[in-house]
Protein backbone atom coordinates (compact mmCIF):
# COMPACT_ATOMS: atom_id res chain seq x y z
CA UNK A 1 0.00 0.00 0.00
CA UNK A 2 1.40 3.41 -0.99
CA UNK A 3 2.30 5.80 1.82
CA UNK A 4 0.41 9.11 1.90
CA UNK A 5 2.55 12.11 2.75
CA UNK A 6 1.10 15.39 4.02
CA UNK A 7 4.23 17.22 2.87
CA UNK A 8 7.52 16.44 1.23
CA UNK A 9 9.48 18.36 3.89
CA UNK A 10 8.51 19.59 7.35
CA UNK A 11 10.71 22.28 8.87
CA UNK A 12 10.63 22.52 12.65
CA UNK A 13 11.47 26.08 13.65
CA UNK A 14 10.43 29.31 11.95
CA UNK A 15 13.48 31.50 12.46
CA UNK A 16 15.47 32.96 9.56
CA UNK A 17 17.09 29.61 8.69
CA UNK A 18 13.78 27.73 8.61
CA UNK A 19 12.10 30.45 6.52
CA UNK A 20 14.94 30.61 4.00
CA UNK A 21 14.99 26.83 3.64
CA UNK A 22 11.23 26.84 3.07
CA UNK A 23 11.55 29.35 0.22
CA UNK A 24 14.44 27.44 -1.34
CA UNK A 25 12.34 24.27 -1.34
CA UNK A 26 9.20 25.95 -2.67
CA UNK A 27 10.88 27.55 -5.68
CA UNK A 28 11.87 23.98 -6.52
CA UNK A 29 8.20 22.91 -6.24
CA UNK A 30 8.66 20.91 -3.04
CA UNK A 31 5.60 20.73 -0.74
CA UNK A 32 6.85 22.39 2.44
CA UNK A 33 5.47 23.43 5.82
CA UNK A 34 7.13 25.36 8.64
CA UNK A 35 6.04 24.54 12.19
CA UNK A 36 6.87 27.31 14.70
CA UNK A 37 5.81 27.15 18.33
CA UNK A 38 5.68 30.96 18.82
CA UNK A 39 2.39 32.49 17.67
CA UNK A 40 4.15 35.67 16.52
CA UNK A 41 7.67 36.68 15.53
CA UNK A 42 9.79 37.86 18.44
CA UNK A 43 10.48 41.60 18.19
CA UNK A 44 13.86 41.10 19.89
CA UNK A 45 17.01 40.42 17.91
CA UNK A 46 20.08 38.50 18.98
CA UNK A 47 21.79 39.00 15.61
CA UNK A 48 22.16 42.34 13.87
CA UNK A 49 24.02 41.92 10.62
CA UNK A 50 24.35 40.12 7.31
CA UNK A 51 27.84 39.49 5.99
CA UNK A 52 29.17 39.42 2.43
CA UNK A 53 28.63 35.72 1.66
CA UNK A 54 25.01 35.84 2.80
CA UNK A 55 24.42 38.96 0.71
CA UNK A 56 26.05 37.33 -2.31
CA UNK A 57 23.77 34.32 -1.91
CA UNK A 58 20.66 36.45 -1.45
CA UNK A 59 21.64 38.35 -4.59
CA UNK A 60 21.47 35.08 -6.52
CA UNK A 61 17.80 34.83 -5.59
CA UNK A 62 17.05 38.47 -6.42
CA UNK A 63 16.51 39.35 -2.74
CA UNK A 64 19.29 41.80 -1.94
CA UNK A 65 17.31 44.87 -2.96
CA UNK A 66 14.55 44.19 -0.43
CA UNK A 67 17.12 43.59 2.31
CA UNK A 68 19.05 46.78 1.53
CA UNK A 69 15.97 48.99 1.29
CA UNK A 70 15.93 51.25 4.35
CA UNK A 71 18.84 49.40 6.01
CA UNK A 72 22.20 50.89 6.91
CA UNK A 73 25.47 49.28 5.93
CA UNK A 74 28.96 49.77 7.26
CA UNK A 75 32.40 48.93 5.97
CA UNK A 76 33.99 47.71 9.17
CA UNK A 77 33.48 45.52 12.21
CA UNK A 78 35.35 44.26 15.25
CA UNK A 79 37.31 41.18 16.21
CA UNK A 80 37.31 40.45 19.96
CA UNK A 81 36.78 44.16 20.62
CA UNK A 82 40.32 45.03 19.51
CA UNK A 83 41.01 48.72 18.92
CA UNK A 84 41.81 48.19 15.22
CA UNK A 85 38.67 47.75 13.16
CA UNK A 86 38.18 44.96 10.63
CA UNK A 87 37.97 46.49 7.14
CA UNK A 88 35.21 44.76 5.14
CA UNK A 89 35.60 47.23 2.27
CA UNK A 90 38.81 45.41 1.25
CA UNK A 91 36.89 42.20 0.41
CA UNK A 92 36.87 40.98 -3.19
CA UNK A 93 33.08 41.08 -3.40
CA UNK A 94 30.35 43.28 -4.81
CA UNK A 95 28.96 43.22 -1.28
CA UNK A 96 32.05 44.28 0.66
CA UNK A 97 30.19 45.58 3.69
CA UNK A 98 28.05 44.40 6.56
CA UNK A 99 24.33 45.14 6.37
CA UNK A 100 22.50 46.22 9.52
CA UNK A 101 19.48 43.92 9.42
CA UNK A 102 18.22 42.91 12.85
CA UNK A 103 17.28 39.26 13.20
CA UNK A 104 13.59 40.13 13.60
CA UNK A 105 13.68 42.08 10.33
CA UNK A 106 15.62 39.35 8.52
CA UNK A 107 13.12 36.75 9.73
CA UNK A 108 10.19 38.90 8.58
CA UNK A 109 11.62 39.42 5.10
CA UNK A 110 12.40 35.73 4.70
CA UNK A 111 8.95 34.73 5.95
CA UNK A 112 7.36 37.10 3.42
CA UNK A 113 9.47 35.44 0.72
CA UNK A 114 8.43 31.93 1.86
CA UNK A 115 4.76 32.91 1.78
CA UNK A 116 5.17 34.48 -1.68
CA UNK A 117 6.41 31.20 -3.13
CA UNK A 118 3.74 29.12 -1.43
CA UNK A 119 5.18 27.67 1.78
CA UNK A 120 2.68 26.66 4.48
CA UNK A 121 3.68 28.69 7.57
CA UNK A 122 2.07 27.53 10.82
CA UNK A 123 2.78 29.75 13.81
CA UNK A 124 1.65 28.66 17.24
CA UNK A 125 2.13 25.00 16.26
CA UNK A 126 4.57 23.30 18.64
CA UNK A 127 6.17 20.01 17.64
CA UNK A 128 6.11 17.68 20.64
CA UNK A 129 7.50 14.45 19.15
CA UNK A 130 9.42 13.31 16.08
CA UNK A 131 9.68 9.76 14.70
CA UNK A 132 11.12 8.25 11.57
CA UNK A 133 10.87 4.99 9.67
CA UNK A 134 12.45 3.69 6.51
CA UNK A 135 9.99 5.51 4.25
CA UNK A 136 8.38 8.22 6.35
CA UNK A 137 8.99 10.72 9.13
CA UNK A 138 6.22 11.82 11.50
CA UNK A 139 5.77 14.74 13.87
CA UNK A 140 3.16 15.25 16.58
CA UNK A 141 1.99 18.85 16.75
CA UNK A 142 0.15 20.79 19.44
CA UNK A 143 -1.68 23.54 17.53
CA UNK A 144 -4.30 26.16 18.36
CA UNK A 145 -7.09 23.74 17.44
CA UNK A 146 -5.66 20.65 19.12
CA UNK A 147 -3.12 17.88 18.68
CA UNK A 148 -2.45 16.33 15.28
CA UNK A 149 0.18 14.34 13.38
CA UNK A 150 1.88 15.13 10.06
CA UNK A 151 3.80 12.79 7.78
CA UNK A 152 6.61 13.82 5.45
CA UNK A 153 9.46 12.36 3.49
CA UNK A 154 11.99 14.44 5.46
CA UNK A 155 12.01 16.58 8.60
CA UNK A 156 14.55 19.36 9.06
CA UNK A 157 15.28 20.67 12.54
CA UNK A 158 15.91 24.40 12.51
CA UNK A 159 14.74 24.52 16.10
CA UNK A 160 17.73 25.94 17.94
CA UNK A 161 20.41 24.73 20.30
CA UNK A 162 18.07 22.52 22.35
CA UNK A 163 16.70 20.96 19.13
CA UNK A 164 13.97 18.35 19.61
CA UNK A 165 14.71 17.00 16.12
CA UNK A 166 18.37 16.47 16.97
CA UNK A 167 17.47 14.61 20.14
CA UNK A 168 14.91 12.46 18.32
CA UNK A 169 17.56 11.60 15.73
CA UNK A 170 19.96 10.50 18.47
CA UNK A 171 22.68 12.82 17.20
CA UNK A 172 25.32 13.75 19.78
CA UNK A 173 26.08 17.43 20.40
CA UNK A 174 29.61 17.55 21.82
CA UNK A 175 31.50 20.68 22.68
CA UNK A 176 32.52 22.91 25.56
CA UNK A 177 30.32 24.19 28.37
CA UNK A 178 29.89 27.82 29.31
CA UNK A 179 32.50 29.65 31.37
CA UNK A 180 31.59 33.24 30.45
CA UNK A 181 28.19 34.68 31.34
CA UNK A 182 26.74 37.42 29.15
CA UNK A 183 23.83 39.46 30.50
CA UNK A 184 22.02 41.75 28.10
CA UNK A 185 19.04 44.02 28.00
CA UNK A 186 17.31 46.57 25.82
CA UNK A 187 17.00 49.45 28.27
CA UNK A 188 16.65 53.19 28.57
CA UNK A 189 19.77 54.92 29.91
CA UNK A 190 19.26 58.01 32.04
CA UNK A 191 22.91 59.00 31.49
CA UNK A 192 23.14 58.00 27.83
CA UNK A 193 25.56 60.80 26.93
CA UNK A 194 28.33 59.33 29.08
CA UNK A 195 27.71 55.66 28.35
CA UNK A 196 30.51 53.90 26.46
CA UNK A 197 29.75 53.02 22.83
CA UNK A 198 30.83 49.76 21.24
CA UNK A 199 32.82 47.26 23.26
CA UNK A 200 35.02 48.23 26.18
CA UNK A 201 37.23 45.97 28.31
CA UNK A 202 38.03 46.44 31.99
CA UNK A 203 39.88 44.35 34.55
CA UNK A 204 36.52 42.93 35.68
CA UNK A 205 34.98 42.03 32.33
CA UNK A 206 33.58 43.68 29.22
CA UNK A 207 30.68 45.95 28.40
CA UNK A 208 28.93 46.34 25.06
CA UNK A 209 26.60 49.24 24.33
CA UNK A 210 24.91 50.42 21.11
CA UNK A 211 21.85 52.62 20.48
CA UNK A 212 18.86 50.77 18.99
CA UNK A 213 16.74 53.87 18.40
CA UNK A 214 16.22 57.31 19.89
CA UNK A 215 15.11 55.79 23.20
CA UNK A 216 16.58 52.35 23.80
CA UNK A 217 20.12 50.96 23.99
CA UNK A 218 21.27 47.36 23.75
CA UNK A 219 23.65 46.91 26.66
CA UNK A 220 25.49 43.74 27.68
CA UNK A 221 28.09 42.68 30.21
CA UNK A 222 30.49 39.77 29.84
CA UNK A 223 31.40 38.24 33.18
CA UNK A 224 34.35 35.84 33.33
CA UNK A 225 33.97 35.03 37.04
CA UNK A 226 30.36 34.39 38.08
CA UNK A 227 27.91 31.95 36.53
CA UNK A 228 24.14 31.79 36.42
CA UNK A 229 21.90 28.83 37.12
CA UNK A 230 20.42 27.27 34.01
CA UNK A 231 16.71 27.90 33.54
CA UNK A 232 16.60 31.11 35.59
CA UNK A 233 15.50 34.47 34.25
CA UNK A 234 17.64 37.59 34.16
CA UNK A 235 16.29 40.54 36.13
CA UNK A 236 16.94 44.25 35.62
CA UNK A 237 18.48 44.44 39.11
CA UNK A 238 20.91 41.67 38.15
CA UNK A 239 21.85 43.45 34.92
CA UNK A 240 22.46 46.80 36.63
CA UNK A 241 24.48 45.09 39.37
CA UNK A 242 26.61 43.47 36.70
CA UNK A 243 27.08 46.86 35.00
CA UNK A 244 28.31 48.37 38.25
CA UNK A 245 30.64 45.43 38.83
CA UNK A 246 32.18 45.48 35.35
CA UNK A 247 32.15 49.20 34.56
CA UNK A 248 31.67 50.92 37.90
CA UNK A 249 28.24 52.45 37.21
CA UNK A 250 24.93 51.52 35.59
CA UNK A 251 24.11 54.79 33.71
CA UNK A 252 20.62 54.76 35.19
CA UNK A 253 19.49 51.76 33.13
CA UNK A 254 15.72 51.29 33.50
CA UNK A 255 12.49 50.28 31.72
CA UNK A 256 13.89 47.07 30.23
CA UNK A 257 11.76 45.78 27.35
CA UNK A 258 13.88 42.66 26.89
CA UNK A 259 16.32 40.80 29.15
CA UNK A 260 18.31 37.71 28.27
CA UNK A 261 21.49 35.87 29.10
CA UNK A 262 23.75 33.28 27.52
CA UNK A 263 27.16 31.68 27.91
CA UNK A 264 30.11 30.89 25.66
CA UNK A 265 29.03 27.27 25.30
CA UNK A 266 30.15 26.00 21.88
CA UNK A 267 28.80 22.76 20.43
CA UNK A 268 28.49 21.07 17.06
CA UNK A 269 26.38 18.09 16.02
CA UNK A 270 28.43 14.99 15.19
CA UNK A 271 26.48 14.73 11.96
CA UNK A 272 23.77 16.82 10.31
CA UNK A 273 21.68 13.91 9.07
CA UNK A 274 20.23 10.70 10.46
CA UNK A 275 18.03 8.99 7.89
CA UNK A 276 15.05 11.25 7.21
CA UNK A 277 15.94 13.75 9.94
CA UNK A 278 18.30 16.64 9.21
CA UNK A 279 19.66 19.67 11.09
CA UNK A 280 20.36 23.27 10.13
CA UNK A 281 21.34 26.47 11.91
CA UNK A 282 21.66 26.48 15.69
CA UNK A 283 20.28 22.94 15.86
CA UNK A 284 23.54 21.88 14.20
CA UNK A 285 25.98 24.35 15.80
CA UNK A 286 25.99 26.90 18.61
CA UNK A 287 28.70 29.31 19.72
CA UNK A 288 29.26 32.63 21.45
CA UNK A 289 27.59 35.34 19.31
CA UNK A 290 30.64 37.47 18.61
CA UNK A 291 31.49 38.76 15.15
CA UNK A 292 27.92 38.31 13.89
CA UNK A 293 28.62 34.91 12.32
CA UNK A 294 25.95 32.55 13.68
CA UNK A 295 22.94 33.67 11.64
CA UNK A 296 25.02 33.86 8.48
CA UNK A 297 26.36 30.36 9.06
CA UNK A 298 22.82 29.03 9.36
CA UNK A 299 21.64 30.78 6.20
CA UNK A 300 24.43 29.07 4.27
CA UNK A 301 23.21 25.73 5.65
CA UNK A 302 19.82 26.48 4.09
CA UNK A 303 21.29 27.49 0.73
CA UNK A 304 23.34 24.28 0.65
CA UNK A 305 20.55 21.92 1.72
CA UNK A 306 17.47 23.23 -0.10
CA UNK A 307 18.31 22.32 -3.69
CA UNK A 308 19.80 18.98 -2.69
CA UNK A 309 16.61 17.93 -0.91
CA UNK A 310 14.61 19.03 -3.96
CA UNK A 311 16.81 17.05 -6.36
CA UNK A 312 16.40 13.87 -4.29
CA UNK A 313 12.65 14.35 -3.80
CA UNK A 314 12.11 14.83 -7.54
CA UNK A 315 14.08 11.66 -8.21
CA UNK A 316 16.79 13.43 -10.19
CA UNK A 317 19.61 12.43 -7.83
CA UNK A 318 20.23 9.52 -5.48
CA UNK A 319 19.74 9.97 -1.76
CA UNK A 320 23.53 9.98 -1.33
CA UNK A 321 23.48 13.59 -2.55
CA UNK A 322 22.21 14.48 0.93
CA UNK A 323 25.42 13.15 2.43
CA UNK A 324 27.30 16.01 0.76
CA UNK A 325 25.35 18.44 2.94
CA UNK A 326 27.00 17.10 6.09
CA UNK A 327 30.39 16.77 4.39
CA UNK A 328 30.38 20.36 3.14
CA UNK A 329 28.82 22.23 6.05
CA UNK A 330 30.69 20.65 8.97
CA UNK A 331 33.97 22.38 8.09
CA UNK A 332 32.70 26.00 8.00
CA UNK A 333 30.95 25.51 11.34
CA UNK A 334 34.11 24.14 12.96
CA UNK A 335 36.04 27.21 11.81
CA UNK A 336 33.44 29.57 13.25
CA UNK A 337 33.53 27.75 16.59
CA UNK A 338 37.31 28.01 16.57
CA UNK A 339 37.47 31.74 15.89
CA UNK A 340 34.73 32.58 18.41
CA UNK A 341 36.63 30.61 21.06
CA UNK A 342 39.74 32.58 20.12
CA UNK A 343 37.85 35.84 20.50
CA UNK A 344 36.59 34.84 23.95
CA UNK A 345 40.17 34.09 25.00
CA UNK A 346 41.26 37.54 23.79
CA UNK A 347 38.36 39.22 25.58
CA UNK A 348 39.42 37.79 28.97
CA UNK A 349 39.97 40.71 31.37
CA UNK A 350 43.04 39.06 32.93
CA UNK A 351 45.94 41.55 32.64
CA UNK A 352 48.13 38.74 31.29
CA UNK A 353 45.97 38.80 28.12
CA UNK A 354 46.51 42.52 27.51
CA UNK A 355 49.95 42.22 25.84
CA UNK A 356 48.49 39.64 23.43
CA UNK A 357 45.66 42.01 22.58
CA UNK A 358 48.16 44.80 21.99
CA UNK A 359 50.19 42.57 19.67
CA UNK A 360 47.14 41.51 17.65
CA UNK A 361 45.91 45.09 17.49
CA UNK A 362 49.23 46.02 15.91
CA UNK A 363 49.09 43.09 13.48
CA UNK A 364 45.55 44.05 12.47
CA UNK A 365 47.03 47.31 11.24
CA UNK A 366 48.74 45.31 8.49
CA UNK A 367 46.53 45.10 5.40
CA UNK A 368 47.03 41.38 4.78
CA UNK A 369 46.30 40.40 8.38
CA UNK A 370 43.23 42.62 8.47
CA UNK A 371 41.97 41.13 5.19
CA UNK A 372 42.43 37.60 6.56
CA UNK A 373 40.17 38.39 9.52
CA UNK A 374 37.61 40.19 7.32
CA UNK A 375 37.41 37.17 5.01
CA UNK A 376 37.07 34.82 7.97
CA UNK A 377 34.23 36.76 9.62
CA UNK A 378 32.33 37.32 6.36
CA UNK A 379 32.68 33.71 5.16
CA UNK A 380 33.85 34.65 1.67
CA UNK A 381 36.73 32.17 1.67
CA UNK A 382 34.52 29.13 2.31
CA UNK A 383 35.25 26.50 -0.33
CA UNK A 384 34.14 22.88 -0.69
CA UNK A 385 36.32 19.92 -1.59
CA UNK A 386 34.59 18.55 -4.67
CA UNK A 387 35.49 15.61 -6.87
CA UNK A 388 36.58 16.51 -10.38
CA UNK A 389 39.48 17.63 -12.53
CA UNK A 390 41.77 19.89 -10.54
CA UNK A 391 41.02 23.55 -11.31
CA UNK A 392 41.61 26.75 -9.35
CA UNK A 393 37.86 27.53 -9.33
CA UNK A 394 36.53 24.09 -8.35
CA UNK A 395 34.63 24.31 -5.06
CA UNK A 396 34.86 28.10 -4.84
CA UNK A 397 31.94 30.52 -4.84
CA UNK A 398 31.38 31.84 -8.34
CA UNK A 399 32.07 35.56 -8.70
CA UNK A 400 29.55 38.05 -10.10
CA UNK A 401 30.84 37.59 -13.62
CA UNK A 402 29.74 40.12 -16.22
CA UNK A 403 28.64 38.42 -19.44
CA UNK A 404 28.18 39.68 -23.01
CA UNK A 405 26.13 37.81 -25.59
CA UNK A 406 23.91 38.45 -28.59
CA UNK A 407 21.04 39.01 -26.15
CA UNK A 408 22.93 41.80 -24.38
CA UNK A 409 24.76 42.15 -21.09
CA UNK A 410 24.02 40.32 -17.85
CA UNK A 411 25.66 39.24 -14.61
CA UNK A 412 25.74 35.70 -13.24
CA UNK A 413 23.30 36.29 -10.31
CA UNK A 414 20.56 37.25 -12.76
CA UNK A 415 20.56 33.68 -14.11
CA UNK A 416 20.18 31.99 -10.70
CA UNK A 417 16.97 33.46 -9.30
CA UNK A 418 14.99 30.25 -9.82
CA UNK A 419 17.49 28.10 -7.94
CA UNK A 420 18.79 26.29 -11.03
CA UNK A 421 22.36 25.49 -11.91
CA UNK A 422 24.08 27.55 -14.59
CA UNK A 423 26.44 26.30 -17.28
CA UNK A 424 28.57 29.14 -18.62
CA UNK A 425 30.00 28.56 -22.11
CA UNK A 426 32.66 31.26 -22.28
CA UNK A 427 35.52 30.11 -24.48
CA UNK A 428 33.81 28.99 -27.68
CA UNK A 429 34.86 25.36 -27.18
CA UNK A 430 32.27 23.11 -28.92
CA UNK A 431 32.79 20.37 -26.33
CA UNK A 432 30.95 22.47 -23.70
CA UNK A 433 27.74 22.60 -25.74
CA UNK A 434 28.13 18.99 -26.86
CA UNK A 435 28.48 17.70 -23.31
CA UNK A 436 25.43 19.62 -22.16
CA UNK A 437 23.26 18.57 -25.10
CA UNK A 438 24.13 14.90 -24.65
CA UNK A 439 23.40 15.10 -20.92
CA UNK A 440 20.18 17.10 -21.41
CA UNK A 441 18.93 14.46 -23.82
CA UNK A 442 18.96 11.84 -21.04
CA UNK A 443 17.08 13.73 -18.29
CA UNK A 444 13.37 14.39 -17.82
CA UNK A 445 13.79 18.10 -17.21
CA UNK A 446 16.88 19.74 -18.68
CA UNK A 447 15.77 23.06 -17.13
CA UNK A 448 17.48 22.12 -13.89
CA UNK A 449 20.60 23.57 -15.55
CA UNK A 450 20.44 26.84 -17.48
CA UNK A 451 23.00 27.11 -20.32
CA UNK A 452 24.38 30.62 -20.87
CA UNK A 453 26.75 31.48 -23.72
CA UNK A 454 28.77 34.67 -23.77
CA UNK A 455 32.08 36.40 -23.29
CA UNK A 456 33.62 37.46 -20.00
CA UNK A 457 36.56 39.84 -19.72
CA UNK A 458 37.10 38.88 -16.07
CA UNK A 459 37.99 35.28 -17.04
CA UNK A 460 39.57 35.52 -20.51
CA UNK A 461 41.17 32.05 -20.40
CA UNK A 462 38.14 30.18 -19.10
CA UNK A 463 36.32 27.84 -21.50
CA UNK A 464 33.38 27.10 -19.25
CA UNK A 465 32.08 26.80 -15.70
CA UNK A 466 29.25 24.83 -14.11
CA UNK A 467 27.70 26.57 -11.10
CA UNK A 468 25.51 24.76 -8.57
CA UNK A 469 22.24 26.38 -7.38
CA UNK A 470 23.97 27.47 -4.15
CA UNK A 471 26.57 29.42 -6.15
CA UNK A 472 29.54 27.06 -5.86
CA UNK A 473 31.56 25.91 -8.87
CA UNK A 474 31.04 22.22 -9.66
CA UNK A 475 33.25 22.16 -12.77
CA UNK A 476 35.53 24.52 -14.67
CA UNK A 477 38.00 24.16 -17.54
CA UNK A 478 40.38 26.53 -19.32
CA UNK A 479 40.48 27.12 -23.07
CA UNK A 480 43.71 25.15 -23.45
CA UNK A 481 42.24 21.98 -21.90
CA UNK A 482 42.11 18.74 -23.89
CA UNK A 483 38.80 18.44 -25.73
CA UNK A 484 38.15 14.87 -24.63
CA UNK A 485 38.98 15.58 -20.99
CA UNK A 486 36.92 18.78 -21.01
CA UNK A 487 33.84 16.97 -22.27
CA UNK A 488 34.31 13.97 -19.98
CA UNK A 489 34.77 16.18 -16.91
CA UNK A 490 31.69 18.28 -17.63
CA UNK A 491 29.46 15.26 -18.27
CA UNK A 492 30.66 13.71 -15.02
CA UNK A 493 29.90 16.89 -13.06
CA UNK A 494 26.47 17.31 -14.66
CA UNK A 495 25.52 13.76 -13.72
CA UNK A 496 27.00 13.95 -10.22
CA UNK A 497 25.27 17.20 -9.22
CA UNK A 498 22.25 17.47 -11.50
CA UNK A 499 21.23 13.85 -11.90
CA UNK A 500 20.13 11.46 -14.59
CA UNK A 501 16.84 10.43 -16.17
Image (cartoon, helix red, strand yellow):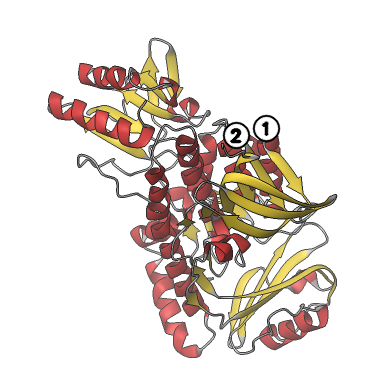
Out of 94 and 336, give the one closest to the viewer: 336
Residue pointed to by mark 2? 26
| Residue at 48% in and 52% down | 88
In the displayed structure, 467 sits above or below 226; it is above
Q: Quadrant of the C terminus?
A: top left
Residue 107 point in image, percent of width and height: 68, 48
Q: What is the residue that sits farthest to the front in this orientation?
A: 1
- Residue 190 placement: quadrant: bottom right
Answer above or below: position of 56 versus 443. below
Q: Does the image show residue 469? A: yes
Nearer-N-terminus badge (2/1): 2
Left or right: where does residue 230 sit relative to residue 271?
Answer: right
Q: Which mark is residue 312?
A: none
Query: Residue 109 is drawn in which quadrant?
Result: top right
Q: Is residue 99 visible?
A: no
State the SS at label 1.
Answer: loop
Callout 2 touching callout 1 (CB < 8 Å):
yes
Find disc 1 in the rendering and name its residue.
118
The Cα–Cα distance between marks 2 and 1, rounded to whole angstroms, is 6 Å
In the depicted structure, whether residue 210 falls above or below residue 390: below
Pick whichever, 389 or 172, lies toward us: 172
Q: Image quadrant of residue 442?
A: top left
Amino acid sequence: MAITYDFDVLIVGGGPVGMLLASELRINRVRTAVLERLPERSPHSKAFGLHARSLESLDRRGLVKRFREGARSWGNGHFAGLDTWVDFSALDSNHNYALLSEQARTERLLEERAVEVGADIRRGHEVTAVRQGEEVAEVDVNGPEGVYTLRARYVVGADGGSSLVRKAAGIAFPGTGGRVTARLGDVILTDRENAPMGMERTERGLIFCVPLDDTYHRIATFDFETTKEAGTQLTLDELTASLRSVWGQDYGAHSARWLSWFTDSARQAERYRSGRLMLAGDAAHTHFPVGGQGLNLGLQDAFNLGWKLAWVLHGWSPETLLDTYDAERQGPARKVLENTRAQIALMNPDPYVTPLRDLLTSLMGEAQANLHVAEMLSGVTVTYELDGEDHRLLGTFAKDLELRSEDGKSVLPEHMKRCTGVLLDLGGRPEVAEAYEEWAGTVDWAGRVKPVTGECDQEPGLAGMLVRPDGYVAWAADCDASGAELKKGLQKALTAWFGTA
